[in-house]
Image: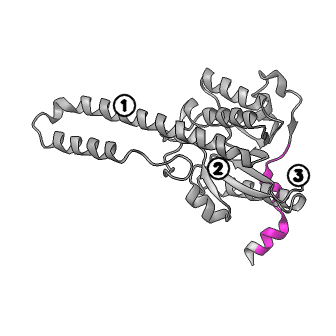
Amino acid sequence: YYCSEKLKIGLLTPYTGSNLGDGAIQEAVMANLRSRLPHARFTLFSLNPEKTTELHGIPSLPITGMIIQSYSMTLRYGQLNGNAPAGMGAKLAALKRKARQSDLEYLLKPFWRLAKGGAVTVLNLGREFRHTLAVFKRLREYRLLIVSGGGQIDDYWGGWLGHPYTLAKWALLARLRGVRIVFLSVGFCSLESRISRRMIGRALRMAEYRSFRDSGSKERLSWLKFSRKDLIKPDLAFSYPLSMNRRAAA
């Protein structure tokens, strides 16, 4: 099963390619798995697929279909979540230019903001729906999904619609597809809202395995009774093979 040359593993991370620590964690995960599963193939599901593909040399795809302020603003549409309807953005831009040319700009500004907000919401819902269907279809190719590193248990960036929703969605789709999902040495940052806590709790409950990178992260999840026996493992960046570090520096 795990020695198959067709084994595909997905790595889920709110990583944009700009954080050295996050990059080291993903490299460490792949290096350790390759030492045990030399035929494994990896895909990164990230917040900036173009950049993470360039940095890590493996396929990368969007982790979400929505553009959420302070969370997924680095995403570019394509591959998994399709393209936005071309006409709507152009029509809204033309309407805004026309309003600016008018003496009624001041009066129309609130209506413009309302229309813009509604259009963004509709586009987000459409993209997320297409993304969810595409992920469900694609997951039949995978055997394992790995959530690792810090910033995973967090709603500071984007609220509950950011990473809490993303993790809950992937965990549910993985379970429906019979794909195992694990949380490796994850860190707790913040969960401000009740809905964020519920979503993170459901995602963790559906995991095959869980570990936390420090005792503080685990203690802050003590309200999840099923997680009390989970292990504490150091940040995975510390497991990055020294031989690889030397080659990179050479």
Q: Position of residue 150 (x, y in %)?
A: 70, 44
Does residue 55 belong to the magenta stretch? no
Residue type pointed to by label 3: Tyr
Does residue 244 belong to the magenta stretch? yes
The residue singled out by tag 2 in the image is: 45
Residue at 45% x, 48% y is: 83
The local crowd at label 2, few if under 14, some if 14 to 19, many if 20 or more residues have their Cα within 10 Å, is many
Relative vertical location of residue 30 with respect to residue 170 in this rendering, above or below: below
Q: CA distance from mark 1 to mark 3?
A: 47 Å
Disc number for residue 118 = 1
Which stretch is magenta? 233-247
Q: Which of these two is toward me, 92 or 185?
A: 92
Q: Position of residue 56 (x, y in %)?
A: 67, 63
The residue singled out by tag 3 in the image is: 2
Question: Can you say which quadrant of the picture contains the C terminus?
Answer: bottom right
Residue at 48% x, 34% y is: 125
Residue type pointed to by label 1: Gly
Task: Answer whether residue 148 is visible to the viewer in this image.
Answer: no
Location of residue 123 (image quadrant): top left
Q: Nearer the viewer, mark 1 or mark 3?
A: 3
